[in-house]
Image (tube, rainbow, N blue to C red):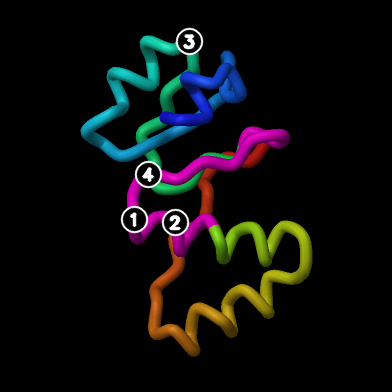
Amino acid sequence: MLLAHAGVVGTHRATTHHTALEELGATGAQVVNERVVDDGELISSGGVTAGIDLGLWVVERFADRELADGLARRMECQRVRPTQVA
């Protein structure tokens, strides 16, 4: 929400904690009710544990999927990847 109110999100597809989705939409963002949203220039997540999914997605996007999957296994975390990537 800080980025949205600062004008960084703009009209990008984005998500935030489920209790603030309506507020996010009021800033002009295209609200997507998912844990992680990758809009190309902007990657957002929906809550505290969704931030782990975002971090693993960043590792996959900029390094390697096997590395991200391996990290998730070490953390005993079941990954949720973005369903639609820009």
Q: Residue furthest right?
A: 63
Q: Residue furthest left?
A: 19
Q: Identify residue type, mark 4.
A: Gly
Q: Residue at position x 63%, y 33% from top?
A: 39
Question: How many badges with numbers are in the image?
Answer: 4
Density class for disc 3 (Cα within 10 Å; few <14, some 14-19, many ≥20) is some
Q: Residue at position x 45%, y 67% from top?
A: 79
Q: Secondary structure at mark 3?
A: loop
- For the residues bearing labels 2 and 1, Cβ distance under 8 angstroms: yes
Earlier in the chain: of badge 2 and badge 3, it is: 3
Residue range highlighted in magenta:
39-54
Earlier in the chain: of badge 2 and badge 4, it is: 4
Q: Secondary structure at mark 2?
A: helix
The dot on residue 51 is 2
Q: Position of residue 8 (x, y in %)?
A: 61, 23
Q: Position of residue 25 (x, y in %)?
A: 38, 16
Q: Residue at position x 50%, y 78% from top?
A: 72
Q: Which residue is mark 3?
A: 28
Q: CA distance from mark 2 to mark 1?
A: 5 Å
Q: Position of residue 21 (x, y in %)?
A: 31, 26
Q: Position of residue 43 (x, y in %)?
A: 59, 41
Density class for disc 1 (Cα within 10 Å; few <14, some 14-19, many ≥20) is few
Q: In the displayed structure, would residue 17 be above or below residue 25? A: below
Task: Find residue 19 and report its image quarter.
Answer: top left
Is 64 placed left or right of 34 in the picture? right
Q: In the displayed structure, would residue 80 be above or below residue 85? A: below
Q: Secondary structure at mark 4?
A: loop
Q: Which residue is mark 1?
A: 48
Q: Which residue is mark 4?
A: 46
- For the residues bearing labels 3 and 4, Cβ distance under 8 angstroms: no
